[in-house]
Structure formats: C-alpha cells, structure tokens
Amino acid sequence: MPELGASLVQMSFGLAVVVGLLFACLWLLRRLSAPRGGGAAIKVLGAAAVGPRERVVLVEIGEDVLVLGVAPGSVARLHELKRADLPLPADLPAQPLPGGKTFATWLRQAAQRRERRDEA
C-alpha cells in the first residue's frame, strides 16, 4: 500500500506542475499579445467600402483626424483635418448634386460602373 500512496502523490505533483506551466504559458501569451502603450491614442471613427476590397477610413489620432484610403497591401492618406473641423452627421444633410442625385447614390453608381468595367 505505501507504493500506491507514493504513486498518487507523485502523479498529483506532476499534474500540478503541468497545470502550472499551462497557466504560465497562457499568461505569457496574453501579456505578449496585449497592445503597446500608444494603441489607445488611435481610434477608428468610421469606415465605408468604396469597392470590393477598398475602404475609406476615418482615424482619430489626438486632435487630428486622418482620412485614409485602404486597399490590399497599401494605405494612403487622402486628407487630414482637425477634430473640431469634422462635421457631425446631423450637420450633413443629403444634398443633391447638380444631376439630382445625392453623393452616396453617385458614389455607389460610380463604383458599380467601375466593377463592370473591371470585369469586362
């Protein structure tokens, strides 16, 4: 019987070591994948798809707002403005363009024409 007790103690100790190593690895993994200090200073305000894989993204960095064009393999700064100069959505009524269309309608139709042209 003493061998059984010694075996159980040895097995329990081995299990405790393995579980401890597992928790240590999980803690280390979480610590290494956490965002670094400057990550909180960047905030994505919004994004709009302008093509199947292209987007226009508004990014706030401190008091500046960047308008970025994002495509596979590239990011380009399209415009930069101050946060105070950014119009609020209530300030932007859908005003028709000279052709009688809103900008959103015009942009959607232009993207569709471009897709058809690229497919041909």
Image (spheres, rainbow, N blue to C red):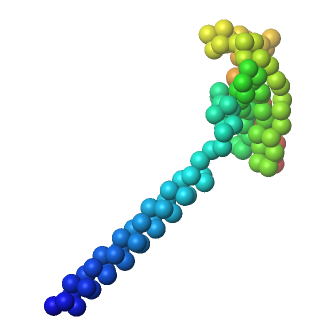
77 or 103: nearer the viewer: 77
Q: Is residue 86 above or below residue 47?
A: above
Tell me where residue 18 sits by quadrant.
Answer: bottom left
89 or 51: nearer the viewer: 89
Q: Is residue 83 above or below residue 56?
A: above
Residue at left offset 73%, top offset 20%: 63
57 or 41: nearer the viewer: 41
Residue at left offset 44%, top offset 61%: 23
Tell me where residue 112 sits by quadrant.
Answer: top right
Residue 94: image x %, image y %?
67, 12
Tell me where residue 58 sits by quadrant.
Answer: top right
User: Residue farthest to the front?
Assistant: 2
Q: Is residue 27 above or below residue 62?
A: below
Q: Is residue 100 visible?
A: no
Q: Is residue 4 above or below residue 64?
A: below
Residue 65 horizontal side relative to residue 30, left or right: right
Residue at left offset 19%, top offset 89%: 2
The mark tally for this picture is: 0
Residue at left offset 72%, top offset 37%: 55
Quadrant where the image shows the N terminus: bottom left
Residue 57: image x %, image y %?
71, 32
Residue 101 horizontal side relative to residue 6, left or right: right
Q: Is residue 82 visible?
A: yes
Residue 32: image x %, image y %?
60, 54
